Image (cartoon, helix red, strand yellow):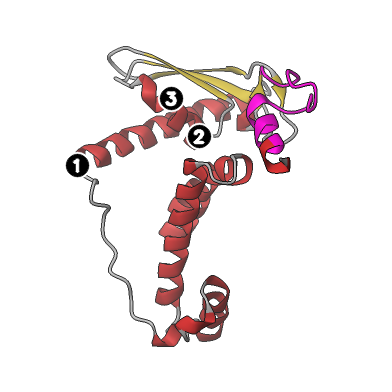
């Protein structure tokens, strides 16, 4: 239950919504999220089949080609960590999730003070904590904020929250300074305008 309601629904799916809905169709980040969700669903349907027989059968028919046969004739999958996964990667994610928890606390304080509404209305500055600049994009995604900047430093991480810069994009809902630069799509940010043009081509 914790995996489905916390790790999957409240965290992973929420964090991936932007890339699933807003990135280009064949963007590697979008495709990797789709693949991950497919693998999770495939495994969960197999696990649920003995208990939720009819529901699992319907889900399986939607998920696969019918030539694979009934879900009740499938075997359980062997699930393991990816080949490149190691202790360092696990420690990195523990650190990022701890930072996310601190960011969420800071965002909630700003909400209570009526300085922001949704997290996408915020810009976050992280100082210290030994964070790497290359973690900025990932933290921005998992914290669900419009902008996130990392300033190197040692010691405990310090979180500062300010209203996001720019204008809200009508497509991704992020606040971006690039909104309005594209004359064909003045209501969209640079990324969304590019994706829309590519899709229409």
Q: Main secondary structure of the magenta part?
A: loop
User: Which stretch appears magenta?
Assistant: 177-197
Q: Nearer the viewer, residue 35 or 150?
A: 35
- Residue found 68% across the figure and 26% down from its top: 189
> Which residue, given by chain and number where applicable, does mark 2 sit on?
141
Q: Position of residue 36 (x, y in %)?
A: 43, 55
Q: Earlier in the sequence, mark 3 or mark 1?
A: 1
Please indicate, yes or no, whether residue 49 appears anywhere in the rendered image.
yes
Residue 178 colored magenta? yes
Estimate the spatial distance between the alpha carbons at disc 2 and disc 3, rounded to whole Å: 9 Å
Judging from the image, what secondary structure is the residue with disc 3 in? helix
Rendered position, 98 above or below 150 = below
- Tell me the quarter of the image containing the N terminus: bottom left
Q: Would you call the spot at circle 3 few (<14 residues within 10 Å), some (14-19), or many (20 or more)? A: some
CB under 8 Å between discs 3 and 1: no
> What separation in Å lies between label 3 and label 1 (alpha carbons)?
21 Å
Q: Which residue is mark 1?
A: 87
Q: Is residue 38 above or below residue 117?
A: below
Give the residue at x 51% y 79%. Answer: 56
Pointers 2 and 1 in contact (C-beta within 8 Å): no
Residue 60 horizontal/vertical position (percent): 51, 77
Question: Which image quadrant: the C terminus?
Answer: top right
Return the x and y of residue 67 as percentages of the image width and height: 49, 83
Q: Is residue 112 among what the camera can see?
A: no
Residue under label 3: 136
Tell me which label, 2 or 3, sits earlier in the chain. Answer: 3
């Amino acid at each position: 239950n914790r995996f489905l309601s916390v790790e999957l629904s409240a965290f992973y799916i929420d964090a991936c919504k932007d890339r699933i809905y807003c990135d280009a169709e064949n963007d590697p980040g979008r495709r990797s999220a789709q693949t991950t969700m497919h693998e999770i669903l495939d495994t969960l349907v197999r696990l649920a089949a003995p208990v939720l027989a009819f529901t699992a059968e319907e889900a399986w028919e939607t998920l696969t080609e019918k030539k694979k046969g009934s879900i009740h004739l499938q075997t359980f999958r062997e699930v393991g960590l990816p080949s490149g996964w190691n202790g360092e990667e696990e420690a990195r994610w523990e650190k990022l999730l701890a930072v996310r928890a601190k960011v969420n606390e800071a965002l909630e304080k700003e909400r209570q003070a009526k300085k922001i509404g949704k997290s996408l209305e915020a810009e976050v500055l992280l100082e210290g904590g030994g964070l790497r600049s290359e973690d900025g994009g990932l933290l921005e995604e998992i914290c669900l904020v419009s902008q996130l900047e990392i300033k190197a430093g040692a010691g405990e991480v310090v979180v500062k929250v300010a209203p996001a810069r720019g204008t809200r994009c009508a497509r991704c809902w992020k606040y971006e300074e690039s909104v309005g630069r594209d004359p064909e799509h003045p209501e969209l940010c640079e990324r969304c305008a590019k994706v829309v043009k590519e899709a229409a081509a």
